Structure formats: C-alpha cells, structure tokens
C-alpha cells in the first residue's frame, strides 16, 4: 500500500463540520484541527521531519506560500481552525491590533444593545466567553409564547 501523502494525512486530522463562525469574512463552518494542539492552542502538523502550525500548512496548501514577513491570521479567531477561507496573511502589527480590538471592544461594553446592564445578575457568560443579556433572553422567550391576536376580517 502506498503511504499517504502529507495532504492526505493532514485532511484526516481535520473536522470540517466545526462550529459556524459569526464573523465577517469567515464564511461557512470552522475546520477544527483534531490533532494535539501546541500550548497556545494552534494545531501542529508533523511534516518534512518537523512540526509546522496546522493553519499555516492549510494556508500554503490551498492558497499558496505565505508572503515573507506576514502571519496567517484567523478571521474567525479560532486558533484550532484550518479552514482556508478563514485564513488571511496579514502583518504582525495588524494581527495584534485585530485581536486586541475585538477583546477590548467587547470588554468595554457595559450594556447590551437594548441598554440592559451587563452586571452579575443580568449576565450569562457562554462557553465561548461572550456575554448574553438575561433580560433580552426573557423578552425573546415571551415574544415567541405570546399568541398573536386574531384580526378582524375586513
Ligand atoms: Zn474558522
Ligand atoms: Zn438586554
């Protein structure tokens, strides 16, 4: 039996039915690396007798060589994702700016979009770290359970 190519070995370690990304510019589901991640959460792939970062490998496999001096950024912000559509080569400066902007904007928000406070009693923190307003959740629930009044025929 011929040995699998590196690309085949790579594909075996990817779960293409990952969670959907809700961010702009990251269409479709994340492709999650199922192999062991490195301590920072990036996938690692063994090829050419060394470990390479799985998302960098995916980028080069599908898009082409990473331009010199650039880093491969996750638009979906999931480090284990190797979906080439979610990867983009950017400068280190831009990469750092993007990550800190998203976290900073999110952390600075003290209210939900409806103006309810993000305090301890009203906030539910989801597994992915985003916050959800309990008051809004209740409103949504009520809205779906309220029967719509009958309309008179004209
Ligand atoms: Zn992704
Ligand atoms: Zn709210």
Image (spheres, helix red, strand yellow):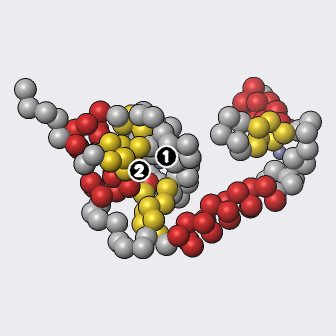
Image quarter of the C terminus: top right
Q: Earlier in the sequence, mark 1 or mark 2?
A: 1
Q: Position of residue 44 (x, y in %)?
A: 41, 43
Which residue: 68% across, 34% down? 127
Q: Which mark is residue 53?
A: 2
Residue drawn at point x = 90 percent, y = 48 percent: 117
Name the side, left or right, on which 24 lies relative to 108.
left
Q: Residue at x 25, y 48 (%)?
A: 48
The picture quadrant where one finds residue 151 is top right
Asked whether the residues under the numbered discs 1 and 2 touch, taking CB atoms below 8 Å apart as contact, a structural biologist would say yes
Q: Is mark 2 within 8 Å of ligand 1?
A: no
Q: Nearer the viewer, residue 51 or 129?
A: 51
Mark 2 packing: few (<14 Cα in 10 Å), some, or many (20+)? some
Label 1, secondary structure: give it: loop
The answer, for residue 75, to whether it is visible in the render is yes
The residue sitting at the front extreme is: 49
Q: Is residue 148 above or below residue 47?
A: above
Q: Position of residue 8 (x, y in %)?
A: 22, 38
For residue 42, the mark is: 1
What x and y, as percent, mark residue 100? 67, 62
Note whether 74 is above or below 89 in the view shown: above
Count the marks: 2
């Amino acid at each position: 039996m011929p040995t699998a190519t590196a690309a085949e070995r790579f594909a075996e370690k990817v779960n293409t039915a990952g969670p959907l990304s809700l961010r702009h510019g990251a269409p479709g589901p994340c492709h999650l690396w199922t192999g062991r991640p490195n301590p920072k959460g990036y996938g690692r792939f063994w090829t050419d007798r060394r470990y390479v970062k799985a998302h960098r490998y995916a980028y080069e496999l599908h898009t082409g060589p990473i331009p010199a001096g650039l880093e491969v950024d996750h638009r979906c912000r999931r480090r284990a994702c190797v979906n080439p559509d979610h990867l983009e080569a950017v400068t280190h400066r831009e990469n750092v700016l993007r990550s800190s902007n998203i976290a900073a904007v999110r952390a600075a928000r003290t209210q939900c979009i409806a103006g309810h406070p993000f305090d301890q009693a009203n906030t539910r923190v989801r597994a992915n770290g985003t916050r959800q307003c309990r008051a809004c959740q209740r409103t949504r629930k009520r809205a779906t359970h309220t029967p719509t009044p009958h309309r008179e025929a004209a």
